[in-house]
Image (cartoon, rainbow, N blue to C red):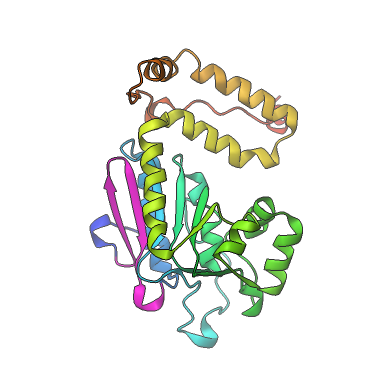
Amino acid sequence: MSEIREAEYEDIRFELQDGVAVATLHRPEQLNAFSGRMGDELGHALTRCDADDAVRAVVLTGAGSAFCAGADMSAGQETFAKQDASGFSATPVHPAPWDVRKPVIAAVNGHAVGLGLTLALQCDVRIVADEGKYGVLQVRRGVMPDACCHFTLPRIVGFERAAWLMLTGAKVKGAEAVAMGLALRSLPAAEVLPAALEMARDVAINTAPLSAAITKRLLWQSPSLTRAEVERFETELHHVLMGAPDAIEGGLAYVERRAPDWKGRVSTDWPEWPRTDAERDRDE
C-alpha cells in the first residue's frame, strides 16, 4: 500500500487522548488475524507515534475477544505461498514497536498466537489476559517464527524456555506467561486494557519524553553492545540530558510536589547517537 491516510484505516483503529495513543487491531470477526493491510496501517500509525510529540506513550491492543490470532489462514494452502524475494520481510510492521521512541505497551486482551505473539514481543511491556492462550505456533504450520522472535524471545524468557516455545509450538495461559517472564502481568480480560492505559497515562505525565526515548533506544540496543560500550553510551547520553531544562524541572517538580512540565521534545532534541566501537574503527 503506497499511500495511507488515517481516515482510511480499515484493519486498525487509532485514537490519541491526553498523550496516550491507542492502536487497536480491528478485525474482530477474524479474531484480528493479521493481514497485509493491517501491517501497513499499523506501520503508518507507529510512524506517527514516533514523530508526534503529542504522543507520549502507545498502547497496542485488539478489538473483541482476541489480541491477534496470527496470520490470516483463510487462504488455506496458499496462506504461506512463496513470496517475491525482493518484497518480503519476515517482520511485517515497519517501524517495529521497538523503533518507536515512546514506550509501547501491549494490552494483550485475549489469545495471541503466531505473529500475534511475536508482534507483542516487539513491545516494551506486555499485560496479558488470564483467559488467553499464547504461543509461537509457526513450526506447526510448516513455517518458522517471525518478527525477529529469534532475537526477542530468548532475551525475554531465556534460551531454554524460548526453545521450548519456538520448537514445539506450545501454548501457555496468562499466569504461566507471567511466571516465565513472557508478560509483566496477567489480569482478567476486561481489566487488561484499563491497566495498560493506567500505565501509559502515568508515563505521559511523569516521565520526561526525551529521557524515556533515549533510555528505550539504548535498552533495545544493549544486547549487541559490550559492557564497556554500554558505559560509554550511558556517559555520552547523560551529557545530553544533564543540565537541560527537563533535568532541572524534574528536581523542582519533585521538591514542589507537583506534576512536571516537560520541555524536551523527541522530534527536535534527539541527539546524535553514539557510535559503537566497530563503527568508530570503520570510520577511522
Query: Which residue occupies 50% across, 16% down?
Result: 242
Q: Quick check: 247 left or right of 28?
A: right
Quadrant including the C terminus: top right
**Picture mark count:** 0
Q: Position of residue 135 (x, y in %)?
A: 59, 69
Q: Is residue 25 magenta?
A: yes
Quadrant including the N terminus: bottom left
Q: Position of residue 49 (x, y in %)?
A: 37, 45
Query: Which residue occupies 35% across, 78% down?
Result: 29
Task: For residue 104, say whether it is visible.
Answer: yes
Name the residue furthest left.
7
Q: Position of residue 241 (x, y in %)?
A: 49, 20
Image quarter for residue 276? top right
Q: Is residue 119 above or below residue 99?
A: below
Image quarter for residue 26? bottom left
Query: Which residue occupies 72% across, 33% down?
Result: 278
- Start-end of magenta stretch: 10-31
Task: For residue 46, say whether it is visible.
Answer: no
Q: Is residue 208 above or below residue 20?
A: above
Q: Is residue 73 above or below residue 127?
A: below
